[in-house]
Structure formats: structure tokens, C-alpha cells
Image (tube, rainbow, N blue to C red):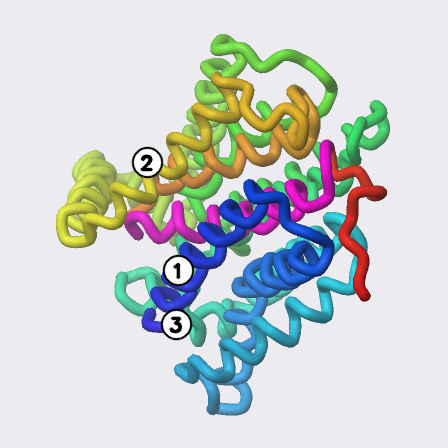
Amino acid sequence: MTAALGYTAIGIVFYAAFVALMLRGAGDRVRVGLRSGACVAAAFPLALLVQGASQHWLKRGGGSPLLLSALCAAIGLAASRLRVLTPVYVLAALTVAVIAVDVAITGPIQAASVLGYSLQTTGRFYGMANASFSVFAASLLLLAAAAAGRSPSRVRATAATAVLAVGLAFLAAPWLANDIGGTLTMVPVTLACAWGFFNRQITPRVVVVGALIGVGVIAGLTAVEAAIGEGTHLGRAAQSNSSLVNTVWHRVEVNVGLLVHQPWGFLCILLAGGGLVALAVQRRWTDYLPPRSPLRIVAISALVVSLLGFAVNDSGPVVIVLCLVVLAPMIALTALHGPAGTPGAAPTRR
């Protein structure tokens, strides 16, 4: 976890400098540097997976901060050659693909990386780890934004919805991710995103209906797994009320305990909650993330995922942090490239 904490500290310094320089009116040369920095930051999740693969198959480099830094720099600088928001989209696609393939083959890469620490510290040794879910879900949302485009037609809105639906099915499948907390989080988020992609207004009623549908989906999966006797943690919990209650209580106890022993977790919650209020209620950043635009929908959804994921899982604020790790570079590149990611505003290399 040393590398992750180091990244967090460096990230805070970088984004603080980013905001300060942008407020002072950064020139083209500075913008190029900021763009490269944002791309390097965006490469962190993929670099963790590559490092995990090195540890699993080559038996070396798993705990090396130098290797992780080199991977972030190499991947990020290569991605920075792409235009506008393409770097974060490409990195998100690669991250989702690697996690999906890895989980499908029993997850050796995530287990050998920081993302799989929860698999090593709990009694569950299969499926998708909570940290992996956080990165997977946030990256999946970026893929949906890429599919939707700046002003989605009905076809592109359908494609974006399909991306989220496939990811949701992967999370729910007992033989794949088998992530019930992730499924419970992503069902209402997927429904709300789809509603927004088709240019429908997201009202409190829509949110409530989405949450109820999410509970209904989990109840249905629980009933099916309990009936056919699947050996999943959901199926086992459904066979005993005490097991289900213990599972819920364990999540509450662990999250509260982590917040007590890691006060910085409250800062993460404030950052995610404050960002959500600023985007959803106060209509901030309308020039860069216009109301009802796919980018704004995805930004709000990623913050919702971070908070819901924190509530329904038992890994504490790390779920929030990793969602912000994926989301922050997208917002940074959006700010660098002008209102709504206008290509003409892109900084040029000299």
C-alpha cells in the first residue's frame, strides 16, 4: 500500500498545482506539461495491473515503487500523444479489458497487485476485489461516455447503455466477478446513466425507482442462487438470516472502524460528496461539463459509485479514492481543452 499512499500524496500536490496554474492562466507550454501529468496520473490503475502481472508471471517487481513509477510514466506519456480526451478513454478501455480477462481466469493479476489486497485479507478468494471494482466501474463509465459522444444520438445512447449493461452483467455473474456490492451499486447508476444518455431528466423519482430496481435485481439473484444451491457468498447468505445480518453488520463495522483509524477517509467522503453537490445541485462547471451532457452524467455517476461503493463494501475509503483516481484526469483534460472538450482549445506541442 506504500505505492498507493505515495501516489495519493503526489496526486494531491499535482492537482493543487494544476488548479493554481489554471486559475493564473497557464500558457501553452505549461498546459502541455499539465496534460502530460494528467495522463501519467490516469495511467496509475493500468500500471498497477501491469506490475501485478509482472509479479505473478515473472516473480519480480511486485513491490517496487520505481517500477510502478516507470510504468506510470511510460504508459501516461505514450497516451498523452493522443488527442483531447482520447488518452483517458483508451486507458479506461485497456483497464476494463485487463480486469475482465483477469477475473475470468480466476484473477491472478489483481491478487498479485495492490488492487487485490482484500482477497488476501478476507475469507473470499474469488471474484472481483473491492478495489478492482472501484477502478472497473469508474473506467466503465468513461467507456460509456466515449460511446455516447459529446451529443449522443439515439444509436450512440443505445451503445453507451449497452456498454454499461455488459459491465453490469459481468459484475453480477456468479462465475465471473460475483460482486454483489458492485452489482447493487451499478444497477441504479446504469439505469440513471441510460436515462440521461437518452436526454431524459433525472429526477428524485427516477433515482428512487432505480434504487428499488437495484434491490429487486439483488433479491432475484439471491432467490435463484439459493434455489439452485450455488456456492457463492450471496447464496450462502440467503440460506441464513443470521449470515445475512452478520454480513451487513460486518460492512458497517469495518467501514466505521477504518474511518476512525484513518481520519483522511472523512476527507475522501467530503471530496466526493462536495463534488457531487457541485455538479448535480449547484450546476458548477457548466462551460466544461454542460448539463445533461454525457461527460457530466458520467462525472456525477462516478461520484455516486464512489459513495455507494463505500457504503455497500467493506474496504473503507479506498473505494472512493480509486474512483477519484480515474475521474480526476478526465476532468483535468476537460479543463485543459476548453468548453465541452473543444478540440480547437487543445495545447500544442512545441
Separation of residues labelled 1 and 3 (CA atoms) = 9 Å
Image quadrant assignment for residue 208: top left
Query: On screen, 293 above or below 239?
Result: above
For the residue carrying disc 1, how many other residues have a C-alpha within 10 Å: few (<14), some (14-19), or many (20+)? some
Of pointers 1 and 2, the one earlier in the residue sequence:
1
Q: Which residue is mark 1?
A: 8
Of pointers 1 and 3, the one earlier in the residue sequence:
3
User: Would residue 31 be found to the left or right of residue 119 on screen?
Assistant: right
Q: The residue under label 2 is which amino acid type?
A: Leu
Q: The residue under label 3 is which amino acid type?
A: Ala
Residue at x 70%, y 32% (from the top left corner): 161
For the residue carrying disc 3, how many other residues have a C-alpha within 10 Å: few (<14), some (14-19), or many (20+)? some
Residue 200: percent from left, percent from top: 68, 13
User: Would residue 232 be found to the left or right of residue 88 on screen?
Assistant: left
Q: Which residues are magenta?
A: 315-339
Query: On screen, 323 above or below 211?
Result: below
Q: Which residue is mark 3?
A: 3
User: Would residue 77 be found to the left or right of residue 232 on screen?
Assistant: right
Image quadrant assignment for residue 118: bottom left
Q: Nearer the viewer, residue 22 or 252?
A: 22
Q: The residue under label 1 is which amino acid type?
A: Thr
Q: Which residue is mark 2?
A: 270
Query: Quick one: quadrant of the N terminus?
Result: bottom left
Separation of residues labelled 3 and 2 (CA atoms) = 23 Å
For numbered disc 1, what is the local secondary structure? helix
Residue 325: percent from left, percent from top: 49, 53
